[in-house]
Image (cartoon, rainbow, N blue to C red):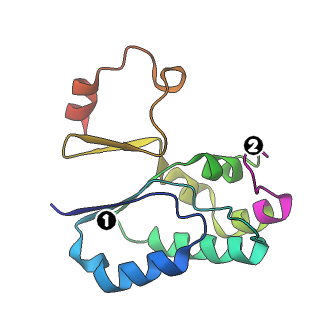
Amino acid sequence: MKTLVWPDVHQRIHILDAFLRDHGHEFDQRIFLGDWFDAYYDNALHALSAATFLKKLMQDERNVFCEGNHDVSYRYGIDMCPGWTQEKNIIINQVLDAADWQRFVPFHVTDNIICSHAGMHPEVFGSDMDFDKIRHEF
């Protein structure tokens, strides 16, 4: 199986879109490691474009979406990341609904590789994580 892993989009959807147009068909699985939103000097229209693009990608079952800290910020409406604004929060959540946010996972295991946005902290996953067990459960 051929897998694409793409980290930290940060609203640079034109780059991702061009790559997927040219090469997306080559991959059986595409794992996105989060942080779809917030970029330097962005605005609500950039967030709207990113959310609309993300919603379209969610229609393809090959795509896996790991949750990044910026995604969490907008999912729960919490100002915890640089760039977060209430205006962007409203626009993003007009596009993405609860079912869309449910597509995000804290990590994904593929081919004995654990993919996550920024690691797996024991406070979230437990200090006695059994990675062999996790690997076999997926």
The crowding category of the residue bearing disc 1, from other C-alpha atoms within 10 Å (few below 14, some 14 to 19, many at least 20), is: few
Task: Find out whether residue 122 is within the magenta segment.
Answer: no
The residue under label 1 is 62
The crowding category of the residue bearing disc 2, from other C-alpha atoms within 10 Å (few below 14, some 14 to 19, many at least 20), is: few
Apparent side of residue 49 relative to residue 23 in the rendered image (left or right)? right
Query: Which residue occupies 32% across, 85% down?
Result: 22
Q: Secondary structure at mark 2?
A: loop
Query: Which residue occupies 76% across, 49% down?
Result: 77
Amino acid carrying mark 1 in the image? Arg
Q: Earlier in the sequence, mark 2 or mark 1?
A: 1
Examine the residues drawn in magenta and state their main secondary structure.
loop
Q: Position of residue 16 (x, y in %)?
A: 45, 75
Query: Which residue occupies 25% across, 42% down?
Result: 113
Task: Find out whether residue 82 is within the magenta segment.
Answer: yes
The residue under label 2 is 80
Q: Is residue 90 above or below residue 121?
A: below
Amino acid carrying mark 2 in the image? Met
Q: Which residues are magenta?
A: 79-89
Q: Position of residue 38 (x, y in %)?
A: 68, 61
Image disc number at residue 20: none
The C terminus lies in quadrant: top left
Q: Nearer the viewer, residue 9 or 31?
A: 9
Quadrant hosting residue 98: bottom right
